[in-house]
Amino acid sequence: MSLKITNALPELVENNIITEETAQKIIAYYDKPKEVSNSNKLFIVFGILGAALVGLGIILIMAHNWDELPKFVKLIAAFFPMILGQVALGYSIAKNKSMLWKETATVFLYFSVGACIALVSQVYHISGNLESFILAWTVLCTPLLYVTKSKSAIFLHLIFSTYYALITGYGYNVQTTPLLYFVLISACIPRYISSMKEKESAIANALHWLLPASLLLSLPVCYDRSPQIAYLLYMFLFGIYINIGQFPYFKNKSLLQNGYLCLGTIGTIILLLLTSFHDAWKYDFRYGVVDTVEVISVITLFLGACFVFYINTKFQKLQQLSMFQLIFLVFGIIFLIGLVDTATATILINILLFAIGIVLIKKGADHIQFSTLNYGMVIITALIICRFYDTEISFAIRGLIFLSIGVGFFITNYIMYKKQLKK
């Protein structure tokens, strides 16, 4: 406790400003050890970085003299770091050490497991590929999610699970869908939910971006033979994100703390802009073959979007619902129309985009929200720019249009600013 506060307490008690009991409570409060201070957080970061560098350094030193070492020395070199990591983690748990100990031991053990798998495979010439190696590594380290409350374990699990999906599901020679990726992601969901209940929400806020980003990057593994299915899959996924972002949990959080809402709304607009081109419907919809996995994925995501929307209707009144929450359903109807008439679908997408922009502009003007107003104007501007590529308009006319839009931005924001001052 600060010396200044300690010296001031007797004087405050003497002048009857506070009671002796209150003074003792103040002393007890400041003497109580804090769970995590800013300095401890910095030590944890450097501890994790140091553990990773030590692990990599050991691997590089061994690799330099690897061919000259006998087999039993190679096996010792393979298992020793992993055993050391297990001992360090077990000691930190048994002695209830600080999070610095636990985080450092977790990271060191995580990378030691990967090194052990690689070294043993090399010693005994066990055949395999990168996909099987990453999968085995991630599965073996999954228990670390729950052995301690390590924050680094869940981050590493999400990163390696996503990497497994990318190297397995992408490419022209891919024959199977890496469904195990979804099993790996499901394994960390309980840990993710528990982090949301903790008072220290910085980690949960980061996970609100990392988890949806992981699913977003890995979604292409769910389709292969029918590119048009991608439009539905992404739109339904964005519908899930937007509705999750409207949950009461995110009500008092800023937009930067709500990765679901940011990724969902921005992704929805980008997807609508892509499908506002007639060529997107004309060429991507010429494939008539749809795989079973693709059908199951579409149905699953659609039901998921409907489910989270239904949950929101329990927390919000009908007039409080955002139009973004139902775009996935509107797009699904337009998609079915596009299977029969691509021109009509293109027109409907353009009308939908224009309507979204107008509604956002009106909402921003009514509630004096500059971000909402400008977001709507950006959508209208992007739509106009996209139509430049569909029509033959001279550069002079395009210049005048851009000039008008720029002036419109200035005038609209100025009017909003004056309106705000009057209130």
Image (cartoon, rainbow, N blue to C red):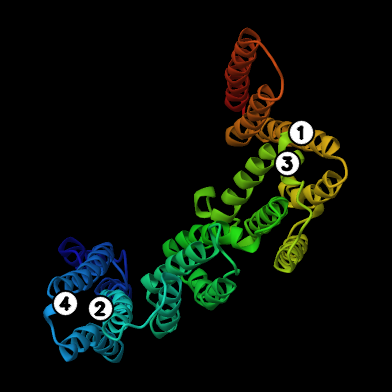
On the rendered image, what quadrant is the C terminus found in? Answer: top right
Indicate which label's residue lies in the foreground, 3 or 2: 3
Residue highlighted by disc 3: 283
Residue highlighted by disc 2: 101
Residue highlighted by disc 4: 66
For badge 3, the amino acid type reads: Tyr
**How far apart in space, not on screen, are marks 4 and 2 (Cα)?**
31 Å
Indicate which label's residue lies in the foreground, 4 or 2: 4
The answer to which of 137 and 104 lies nearer the viewer is 137
For badge 1, the amino acid type reads: Asn
Disc 3 and disc 2 in contact, CB within 8 angstroms: no
Disc 4 and disc 1 in contact, CB within 8 angstroms: no
Q: In the picture provided, is 131 more to the left or to the right than 3?
A: right
Please report the residue visible at 39 percent of the width from the left and 69 percent of the height from the top. 156
Residue farthest toward the top in the current orientation of the protein: 396
**How far apart in space, not on screen, are marks 4 and 1 (Cα)?**
62 Å
Disc 2 and disc 1 in contact, CB within 8 angstroms: no
Location of residue 54 in the rendering, given as x and y in whole percent from the top left corner:
19, 71
